[in-house]
Amino acid sequence: MSVLVTYFSAGGVTADAARKITEVVNGKLFAIEPEVPYSSKDLDWMDSNSRTTLESKDPNMKVAIKSLPDLSGVTTLFVGFPVWWYTAPRIIDTFLDSLNLKGIQIVPFCTSGGTTMETCEKKMKAARPCLTWLKGMRLTPSTTPDQIRAWTNSLPTA
């Protein structure tokens, strides 16, 4: 079984969570990066005209990505993101829609101060019902490797 842990991180919290998962599952790591990096002004959720606010309002918005991973041999793909406006950022939609995910199990994970993983999962699964989804998890900076191990061990294997 080949595991790839992918993530988008704007402030480093999701990157840290992805590294923890990668260590636990002995996988490979891939950063999902926007072609045009987000500035602090772009990330200002209080500004109704900031880039991320405008992206969140348009469900059809595509965010250009620098590069895509090689999925050769990958059976399980973890996809991580910070929660923005109660869901995954648009870059995650672009990422998922840009890959051939046939035969690959998708495991979402998020970082959030309060939004649950279930809220994000419902939207992601509804938009892509043909994919094979496994139970996701919301991680915080205090999530331990043992908690991650318990979660990943509960997932079916390919």
Image: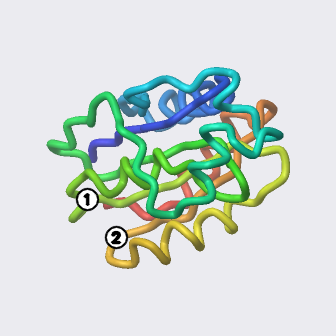
Name the residue that disc number 1 marks.
Answer: 101
Residue 117 relative to residue 59: left or right: right
The kind of secondary structure element at disc 2 is loop
Residue 138 relative to residue 79: left or right: right
Type of amino acid under label 1: Leu
The kind of secondary structure element at disc 1 is loop
Residue at left offset 78%, top offset 39%? 47
Percent across and percent down for residue 130 are 32, 77
Type of amino acid under label 2: Leu
Residue at left offset 38%, top offset 33%? 27
Mark drawn on residue 60? none
**Number of callouts in the render?**
2
Q: Nearer the viewer, residue 157 or 49?
A: 49
Percent across and percent down for residue 69 are 26, 35
Name the residue that disc number 2 marks.
Answer: 131
Q: Measure the C-alpha gap from mark 2 to mark 1.
A: 7 Å
- Dot 2 or dot 1: first in sequence order is 1
Is residue 29 in sight in this rendering? Answer: no
The reply to whether dot 2 and dot 1 touch (C-beta < 8 Å) is yes
Q: Residues within 10 Å of mark 1 (few under 14, many from 20)?
A: some
Residue at left offset 83%, top offset 40%? 46
Residue 97 to residue 128: above or below:
above
Residue 41 to residue 146: above or below:
above
Percent across and percent down for residue 92 are 46, 49
Q: Residues within 10 Å of mark 2 (few under 14, many from 20)?
A: some
Is residue 41 in sight in this rendering? Answer: yes
Residue at left offset 32%, top offset 28%? 66
Percent across and percent down for residue 18 are 55, 32
